[in-house]
Image: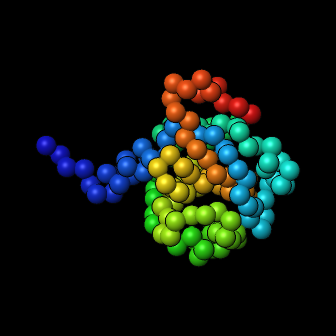
Amino acid sequence: MLMLSASAMAADRYERAVTGEWRLTAALDGAEVTSIDEKEASQLIGKRFEITKDAVRFGTRECGPSDFAAQQVEPDMFLRKEFHASADKLRLPNPVTVVDLSCTTVFIKRPNRLVIAWDGWFFDAVRVKSGSPHSSTAMSK
């Protein structure tokens, strides 16, 4: 019987923690440089964000497969270095697990809660329970 390496088991655990369908619930804060303004960010609240092993989908945008590389970081230092942003408004645990996806980064806030970085903004997101009347495979724009 083959044993999985510790890093493969950890990647699988983080993959399970972040894959699924998510609904953006709040635009928390933007980085110093963003692709969208505050009004555009607020218009994304309520939209669906899908993370699978094969793709990340949001509206009409789709990115390729992810390897779900994860690390535990101190939020203030990580956000300042990687995003030129502050962690003050994100309400992240310290340390926080950061998972690198094909075209974005997510922070595991707690089970079924993420902070998703998108277009220079940080969004609170809640997992959409499968089978709920609002769950669908069609992603909102």
* Residue sitting nearer the eye, 23 or 3: 23
Identify the residue shown where x is 78% and y is 64%.
Answer: 33
Identify the residue shown where x is 86% and y is 50%.
Answer: 39
Q: Locate the N terminus and report the quarter of the image it occupies.
A: top left
- Count of marks placed on residues: 0
Residue 58 is left or right of residue 38, and the answer is left
Residue 86 place in picture, x, y as percent: 68, 71
Looking at the picture, does residue 133 appear above or below residue 121?
A: above
Looking at the picture, does residue 105 appear above or below residue 84?
A: above
Identify the residue shown where x is 80% and y is 43%.
Answer: 43
Query: Residue lying furthest left in this view?
Result: 1
* Residue sitting nearer the eye, 134 or 81: 134
Q: Is residue 138 visible?
A: yes
Residue 134 place in picture, x, y as percent: 62, 27
Q: Is residue 64 visible?
A: no
Residue 33 is left or right of residue 100, and the answer is right
* Residue sitting nearer the eye, 39 or 32: 39
Identify the residue shown where x is 52% and y is 73%.
Answer: 74
Residue 4 place in picture, x, y as percent: 25, 50
Looking at the picture, does residue 123 appear above or below residue 95?
A: above
**Quadrant location of residue 61?**
top right
**Quadrant location of residue 34?**
bottom right
Q: Locate the C terminus and report the quarter of the image it occupies.
A: top right
